[in-house]
Amino acid sequence: MLKTYFSFILLIFVCTFVRAQEAPMYSHFLFNKLAYNPAFAGGKDVAVVQALYRQQWQNIVGAPRTANVNFHTPFAQQKCGLGMMVTQDQLGLLSNTYADLMYAYRLKTSETGVLSVGLQARIEYARFNWNKAKSISPTDNNLQNENENLTKPNFGVGAYYKDKNFFFGFSVPQLLESTLYRSSYEDLPSLHRFRTYYLMTGAELALSPSVDFMPGVLVSYIANAPLQAEINANLVFSKTILVGASYRVGSSVDGLVGIQLTKQLMLGLAYDYSISKLRKENIGSFEAMLEYQFDYNRTGVNHLRYF
């Protein structure tokens, strides 16, 4: 039998039935809204490039590893937004790569309010890396000699509204429920991509001239799976240092720190402490984010923000 094979099957069971984790998750979800909603493209009113890396469930063999790089910008006098994103998600022997192109139409509803509707086109590439499997027995005939892969398209839609101190978004990034990967190995179940619905909202409240309170909520839903919710609260000091915490219902308690390194560059770090049954098997999850905003002085943006 394959030791790595059983580790992979265990992880699939955990992700599907315990967490219902169909898509990559991020503790920095308030900062990485483009990964959830195509209508956010251009939503910061300046061009933005961002890189994010996440290591989930440290000490568990084959646990998820996710890398995300994205860019988005407004254009046509702020009436439209364009976004591009590449995500690489590793789970056991399975490697998924997503390439996304987003377009958003932005309608000004008031002096400070903007309503956006977005479309998303995606190419999904799944690869099963059999060469990473390590057989306990050198004569194991179940170990395949060739890697397997599959490429499929997908599409998404979203809506996003923001005002000076408030935002609200709803999206379905993957409309097609397709089988990302179907193995020819009889005992290995196929991985089916289920449609995920996201609702996200947040606000910014000034507690004092130098302290802001920024709460946020992310709710995700997959048919025939429990509703998932993440509740986040942040304190921002002097528009420069962010300290926050999140509660991922039934899964983890997360701590976040953000530092505005320059007027255009921000660094974010996060640590998740598992509160599920997995807490005995791992030492938590780690995440790092780096974001750069262009055209800072031209647009009059006076500090980095997540909406």
Image (cartoon, rainbow, N blue to C red):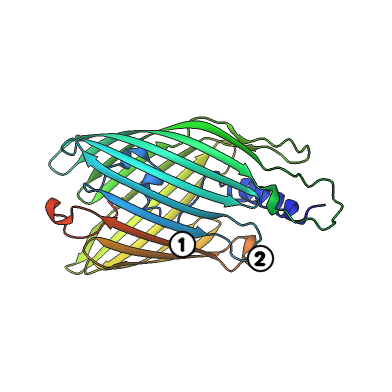
- From the viewer's perspective, is residue 53 above or below residue 42? below
Residue 94's spot in the image, x, y percent? 63, 47
Count every numbered label the image shows and give the total: 2
Q: Nearer the viewer, residue 234 or 296?
A: 296
- Mark before the other along the chain sequence, 2 or 1: 2
Mark 1 burial class by Cα count in 10 Å: few <14, some 14-19, many 20+: many
Choose mark 2 or mark 1, whichever is in front: 1
Which secondary structure, mark 2? loop
Residue at point 65%, 50% (across, down): 93
Q: What residue do we see at 75% from left, 56% from top?
A: 134
Q: Please tell me how crowded label 2 is: few (under 14), some (14-19), or many (20+) other residues with Cα within 10 Å.
A: few
Report which quarter residue 237 is drawn in.
bottom left
Q: Amino acid at mark 2?
A: Glu
The residues tagged by marks 2 and 1 sit, at their Cα atoms, a distance apart of 19 Å
| Residue 33 x/y as whole percent | 37, 48
Corner quadrant of residue 268? bottom left
Kindly state the secondary structure of the residue where label 1 is placed: strand
User: Quick one: 206 or 40, which is closer to the camera?
Assistant: 40
Image coords of residue 82 (percent x, y): 29, 38
Q: Relative to 170, is 281 above or below?
A: below
Per the image, the residue denoted by label 1 is: 287
Tell me the residue at 74%/41% (across/down). 188
Which residue is identified by label 2? 281
